[in-house]
Image: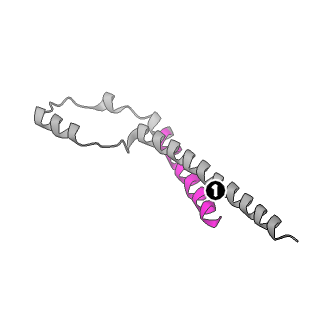
Amino acid sequence: MQSALSALTRLSEAFDRSAEDVVRMSGAPSAAETAETVRISPEARQAGSATDQSLTSGIEGAMVDMRVAKYAFIANLKVLQTSAEVEETAAKMLKP
């Protein structure tokens, strides 16, 4: 139970940080608005498509982080619920 409780604290803090990032970045100009035009060679395009990179920055990444934190938080709540049910069942079994 202690592990689940500490995970809930960490996940809550991670969710808050991601939410702050979303708010902070929502007022910033988008990458498309501030980007400069560049030419990407066919070799670079091929090399880029060969690697599978996940989005970990920007407002999109912060929103994904919030979603991950939400579901991890829910999973840890279920751990606590199951633990309480096991304790209750064990107490009933040991009761004379």
Coloring applied to the structure: one colour
Where is 83 relative to 67, above or below?
below
| Image quadrant assignment for residue 88 | bottom right
Q: Is 10 left or right of 25, judged from the image as shown?
A: right
Q: Residue at x 17, y 34 (%)?
A: 45
Residue holding disc 1: 79
| Image quadrant assignment for residue 61 | top left
State which quarter of the image contains the C terminus.
bottom right
Is residue 31 or residue 96 the one in the foreground? 96
Residue 84 lies, in percent from the top left, at 73, 60
Q: Is residue 6 magenta?
A: yes
Question: What residue span does the magenta drawing correspond to?
Answer: 1-22
Q: Main secondary structure of the magenta part?
A: helix
Q: Residue at x 55, y 58 (%)?
A: 10
Residue 54 lies, in percent from the top left, at 34, 43
Is residue 79 or residue 25 the one in the foreground? 79
What residue type is disc 1 on? Val
Residue 38 lies, in percent from the top left, at 17, 31
Q: Residue at x 68, y 56 (%)?
A: 82
Q: Is 48 left or right of 79, judged from the image as shown?
A: left
| Image quadrant assignment for residue 85 | bottom right
